[in-house]
Image (cartoon, helix red, strand yellow):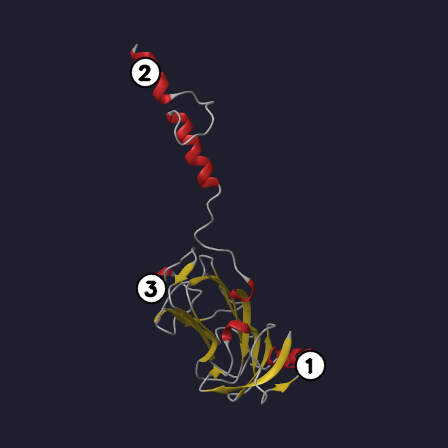
Amino acid sequence: MADIVVYDTVGAPEDTASATGSLHAKVADVKDQLDVLPSTRQAPRGVQGAAGSFYTGNNSAYQTALNITGKGKLVGLKLGDTASDHGFVKVTVDGTVISSGRGYNSGPHYPTPEWMFVTDGTTLIYDTIANGGTPINAAISFKTSLKIELKVFAGIGVYVYWQYELE
Amino acid sequence: MNYFIVPVNDGVLDIDYLYLQEGVQNSETECYVKLKSGAYVRESWQSITEEQFNIIKENLLNLPE
């Protein structure tokens, strides 16, 4: 008698999905609903999801390469220059500087372990963890704003590439 | 794409950065930009060609150390 009650409650794996059926049926129903739920982070929509670049030279002060407001994530970043160690990049998220350092040779890019999130403004981004950098291999989320600035140590060309998504 | 020369004020371009596809800054007061379609365009901005834009970018990347 007890076996019959348990079977009626739990059901069988092949039970059709149902919100009011056996336990197997209810689990199948939940799984079906999860499969059709939209992602919490929406795909880029037109201009709202974007890649871009900024080149500068002959500037000793930081120049604003990108300055946007909204909620989203920074999914890619690359710093490059035409000579070693001449480019400086600063990344500000929600008003807080999360990365400020100097480029190196062909240019570090994020996300990779070689992008070290130093914030002293002078340490090579492509440098060792011993200098205080932290490798981050995940997207950087921002709630209100994202700003990328670039400057040159001497009169050569430096550039930064970026990719971000806005919700 | 739209190509323009836009002013730079204290290191900040006079544009809506949401529409910036590519920027090439060759002086402290002006920047060559490639903007995405739909961007607001000021009448005072000078329109340039893609060829002019690419020449400026090449020159910048070939600056001597």
**Sequence-first disc among 2 and 3:** 2
Badge 3 and badge 1 both on one subunit? no
- The residue under the point 69% across, 81% down is B49
Q: Amino acid at mark 3?
A: Gly
- Kindly identify which chain the residue marked by label 3 belongs to: A
Give the foreground label among 3 and 1: 1
Is label 2 in a helix, a strand or a loop? Answer: helix
What label sits on residue A61 in the rendered view? none
Q: Of the residues shown, which amino acid type is indicated by label 2?
A: Val
CB under 8 Å between callouts 2 and 1? no
The answer to whether marks 3 and 1 mark residues whose Cβ atoms lie closer than 8 Å is no
Q: Secondary structure at mark 1?
A: loop
What distance separates the C-alpha of mark 2 from that of mark 1?
79 Å
Q: Is residue A52 above or below residue A43?
A: below
Quadrant for residue A142, please give it. Answer: bottom left
Q: Which amino acid, by three-letter code, is at mark 1?
A: Thr
The subunit letter for the residue under badge 1 reads B
For the residue labelled by badge 3, is the local secondary structure a helix, a strand or a loop? loop
Badge 2 sits on which subunit? A
Front-lying residue, A6 or A155: A6
Rendered location of residue A87, percent (x, y): 48, 75
Q: Residue at x 56, y 64 (%)?
A: A46
**What residue is disc 1 on?**
B49
The residues bearing labels 2 and 3 have C-alpha atoms spaced at a distance of 63 Å
Q: Residues within 10 Å of mark 2 (few under 14, many from 20)?
A: few
**Rendered location of residue A133, percent (x, y):** 36, 63
- In the image, taking residue A80 as reference, residue A33 lies left or right, namely left
Is residue A81 among what the camera can see?
no
Would you say the residues marked 2 and 3 are in contact, meaning their CB atoms lie under 8 Å apart? Answer: no
Tell me, for residue A5, which label it has, or none. 2
